[in-house]
Amino acid sequence: MARANKFYVQVDGAKELDRDLELMGDGAAAVLDAAVIAGGRIALQKAKQYARSRIKNGTGNLERNIIIKPVIRRAGHSGKKRRIERGSVSIGVSRAGKKGDANNAYYGSFVELGTKYQTAKKFMRDAVDWNRGKIARAVVDKFKSIMRG
């Protein structure tokens, strides 16, 4: 059974920065979220571009279904409580709808990781690895633009 692989880009000092922003006042933590989303959009755009270029004669379904969303953590003993993880976004392939629907690209992990019959076409991993500088620059630029006001 294939399992989707998750990739994380961590900003060193993000937790401390989040704490400092919280101390600055209401809404300051949203600055961190906006900056992380700006970086995430670069990775999202590149993942879609790489998916398009690596799947020859594709329908475009995989590219359309690469999405960005906040990371939600489960908490509590039962795991029913949920909270949004500050300073984190997840970029992945949507599995909404039924298999075969236009909003479901269930096969994204097979393309990314490969199978016994097909080699991996790492569109997600490469989107992050090859664009780390652009992602970091987008995060910093967003911080600067928000702080300048």
Image (cartoon, grey):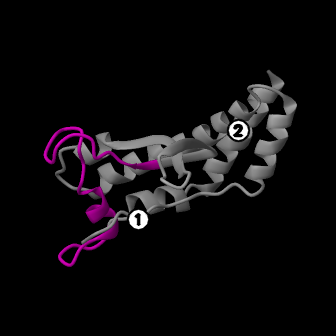
Indicate the position of residue 13 as horizontal and vertical percent values. Answer: 78, 55
Q: Secondary structure at mark 1?
A: loop
Residue 24 falls left or right of residue 113: right
Q: Quadrant of residue 144?
A: top right
- Do labels 2 and 1 touch, CB within 8 Å? no
Instruction: Please tell me how crowded label 2 is: few (under 14), some (14-19), or many (20+) other residues with Cα within 10 Å.
Output: many
What's the mark number on residue 5? 1
Residue type (three-letter) at the residue carrying disc 1: Asn
Residue type (three-letter) at the residue carrying disc 2: Leu
Residues rendered magenta in the picture = 91-120
Q: Quadrant of residue 146?
A: top right
> For this rendering, which residue is in front, 129 or 66?
66
Q: Secondary structure at mark 2?
A: helix
Q: Residue at x 86, y 35 (%)?
A: 23
Against 13, residue 18 (above or below) is above
Against 85, residue 12 (above or below) is below
First-in-chain label (2 vs 1): 1
Indicate the position of residue 108 as horizontal and vertical percent values. Answer: 29, 56
What's the mark number on residue 32? 2
Against 24, residue 125 (above or below) is below
Residue 52 falls left or right of residue 70: left
Question: For the view shown, which residue lies furthest in the left direction?
Answer: 100
Question: For the view shown, which residue lies furthest in the top direction?
Answer: 149
